[in-house]
Amino acid sequence: MTGSDGAAPLERLSLNQITVDQWTLPEVVEGCARAGIGTIAPWREPVAQIGLQAAARLIADAGLRVSSLCRGGFFPTASASDRRRADDDNRRAVDEAAALGTDVLVLVCGPPLGRDLARAREEIAAGIERLAPYAAQHGVRLGIEPLHPMMIGERSAIVTLGEALDIALRFDAGVGVVVDAYHVWWDPALERELARAAGRIVGFHVSDWLVPTPDLLQGRGMMGDGIIELRRLRGLVEDAGYDGPIEVEVINRDLWRLPGDELVALVRERFAAAV
Amino acid sequence: MTGSDGAAPLERLSLNQITVDQWTLPEVVEGCARAGIGTIAPWREPVAQIGLQAAARLIADAGLRVSSLCRGGFFPTASASDRRRADDDNRRAVDEAAALGTDVLVLVCGPPLGRDLARAREEIAAGIERLAPYAAQHGVRLGIEPLHPMMIGERSAIVTLGEALDIALRFDAGVGVVVDAYHVWWDPALERELARAAGRIVGFHVSDWLVPTPDLLQGRGMMGDGIIELRRLRGLVEDAGYDGPIEVEVINRDLWRLPGDELVALVRERFAAAV
């Protein structure tokens, strides 16, 4: 799993689509071919842009692996009809993951709708419970991704690895957790929770924490530009038994202004140097 | 402690200086007299502007109570000489707290200096260990304030109440924790950690979490404008035995543009309605 200098081998790099948000999905596929990257993690919107079947064919024809599909979730809803719509959409996300050839659907669980955070967390667990059997039937594992606590109002009421894991462990191994360095690195309980997550980690994402952080949602740094001990964190994740793809998911508006090939070259270089 | 409508009585309101950063300390003292607010929490910089003895006299002559002084801390340092300077400064902060008539010095513990977060946390615990005897001699309790994890790079490597409490419990009751709603409300372990903090809470601060949050450091909301269940949180803090002053600490650039008296009237109104 580890090169002679301690770096993760390039074979483990998966390019998360949003890192190169300036590209369409066909451009991502072509760019990965040029850069020698063999795995991608698409988002649903750019897949929908060209159509699911076309996307699946494009990816398969290029010989690319798919590490995960981003994303299902957003479980807290304001009404029963909203809940049915969300459930339908989450089942479609499972279908899309299966069609694209990945067995991991990333769950961004959704924010509280008002002030009742405890209720939002209950609705999230209940939503996963409704979705899990369908996902299992389709050979797709659900990856609960805890998000950084600063994103609680917009993205997810699940903000620690421990909490994500507490939910996952109510189910069999078809429900796991996604460990994103950016979202969890600050947690004083991280080492303990990663050990507890052994066998349940279904994804590992990397980027970096910039000082200062320019934006709450789109201010992530390229690996090596911030203060996360990425290599140490990768070691902890590997100690917990995860040796799968490592998704580079850098959500940064400034980097989206670069030419895609230049950005992908930087991703490769920093993956080798800092991950 | 609680009015007939469940609101905290106005007597518990302490105006944290930074909420009205448009005012000098003399203006804060006069403004509180006009608004019928009996307790304040000064910061060291505005105290230094008019001189410690003058500030102490001004506050005492106005009959104001002081709930805490903000702040000591910033323990991680790059060299032995920096560490000595930080220690000297923290002892001066203790002196200032005592001179101003408060028995609580708030500790903002400081960020990691590089990528070694574990080392920063060790340095923080060691720094508190060096400071605690001096504080005890001067009748000042140290309040470790965990800050929101998004502030880790600029302000504090201590980002959860549990972690702050783990440090505090290494000492006698002269070292406690400050519970700021803004910094801790997202924590799924909050209820458990507040119960564990019984007898060690030396301060309670309120503001609100805005959606969206306009700024990582200066984007806090006035109570009632965001999504924190402040009254429920106050109940948990009271269940843990804390019945002291409640500091209103709203760090928000937009509010600093208001006339001070208008802002203080809003603080009073929202304290009654939302806390």
Image: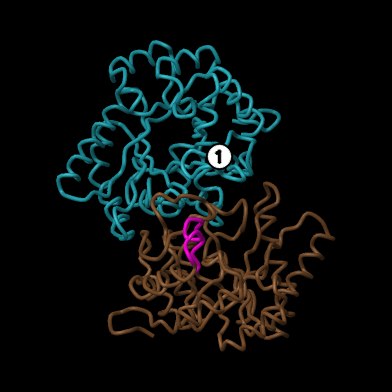
Chain colours: A brown, B cyan
Please name the residue shown 38% across and 68% down the image. A230
Instruction: Specify the segment rendered in magenta.
Output: A249-259
Mark 1 lies on a secondary structure that is helix
- Residue A116 lies left or right of residue B166; in this view the side is right
Please name the residue shown 37% across and 70% down the image. A270
Q: Mark 1: which amino acid?
A: Glu
Chief SS of the magenta region: loop
**Quadrant position of residue A144:** bottom right
User: Which of A218 and A60 lies nearest the eye of the viewer?
Assistant: A60
The chain letter under disc 1 is B
User: Which of B192 and B19 lies nearest the eye of the viewer?
Assistant: B19
Q: Position of residue A201 (x, y in %)?
A: 52, 77
Residue marked by disc 1? B238
Q: Is A257 part of what is drawn in magenta?
A: yes
- Residue A240 lies left or right of residue B171; in this view the side is right
User: Which of A155 and A96 lies nearest the eye of the viewer?
Assistant: A96
Q: Is residue B50 above or below residue B102?
A: above
**Numbered disc total:** 1
Q: Position of residue B189 (x, y in %)?
A: 53, 56
